[in-house]
Image (cartoon, coloured by chain):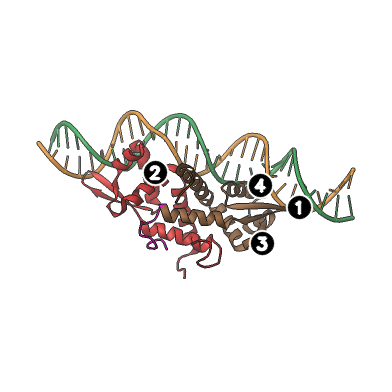
Chain colours: A red, B brown, C green, D orange
Amino acid sequence: METTEPKLVDEEMVKRLSALAHDHRLAIFRVLVRAGTTGLSAGSISEKLDLPPSSLSFHISNLRNAGLVSDERVGRSIVYRADFTAMAGLVAYLNENCCADDPLGSCA
Amino acid sequence: METTEPKLVDEEMVKRLSALAHDHRLAIFRVLVRAGTTGLSAGSISEKLDLPPSSLSFHISNLRNAGLVSDERVGRSIVYRADFTAMAGLVAYLNENCCADDPLGSCA
DNA sequence: CCAATATTTCGATTATTCTTGAAATATGGA
DNA sequence: TCCATATTTCAAGAATAATCGAAATATTGG
């Protein structure tokens, strides 16, 4: 049962899809997924993926803006974490709106 | 177990994500999903979504290029259909690479 | 407070995508 | 064949996104 205005949900999902639809950002998100609840600092992502700090910042703020990533300042660093709930929401949306009706069928 | 070169799979998935990451294209894909195996002609999608034919053509060839949509000429029309297998592949990729490890957990 | 570290914001440039009317292509029917 | 219908391709411009060095901001330790 959907309580929110469908149009807004669609916009939100397009934002999340757009965020993931870029090689750097998908890579960033995936390393954050692997890092789990511990998360990773901007610097270590930057280093791990060999991205200039300003580029990393550009892309990660896109992910944050889409709600897929959360940020927490820890000392001098900022730790980013994948938002698994938001991601699960995207996957659920795709299953419900972009897959065959057949429940528990083609998209399991 | 993955047999294909991971880099290529990632590229393929970015292509699919990009295809869906646009309001018109997501709308197109969703009407095709609802149309099921019957599919819809370019003209009827164009009309249904109030998109100029050339715009529809631009977007649908993006979806086709990403493998999310198939096309078949039927008389003067071209019938498009959602490719549920490709879509299921995308959802599976997201579940496996972008969700919590926890199998059958956060992304069900 | 000052110096060092971590990250972001700014700015200017380049690259890509979107848009859509008009022209071209393909098909079917008279 | 000729005409009407369906769709695509072309082309040119408008809009949006990506890139990344340099300057600005925030934090900590001394």
Q: Label 4 belongs to which residue?
A: B54
Snapshot quadrant of residue B46:
bottom right
Task: Tell me the residue that label 1 is attached to.
Answer: B76
Residue type beneath disc 3: Thr
Q: How far apart are marks 4 and 2 (CA)?
A: 32 Å
Q: Pointer 3: what residue?
A: B38
Marks 4 and 3 sit apart, C-alpha to C-alpha, by: 23 Å
Callouts 4 and 2 close, C-beta under 8 Å:
no
Indicate the position of residue B3 as horizontal and vertical percent values: 48, 47
Give the residue pinned by disc 2: A59
Instruction: Mark yes or no: residue B85 visible.
Output: yes
Marked residue chain, label 2: A
Amino acid type of the residue tagged 4 in the rendering:
Ser
Question: Mark 3 or mark 4, which is nearer the start of the sequence?
Answer: 3
Residue B98 falls within the magenta-colored stretch = yes
Which SS class for mark 2?
A: helix
Residue B46 magenta-drawn? no
Nearest the viewer among B108 and C22 is: B108
Gap in Å between the C-alphas at discs 1 and 4? 16 Å
Q: Magenta part of the protein: which range?
A: B97-108
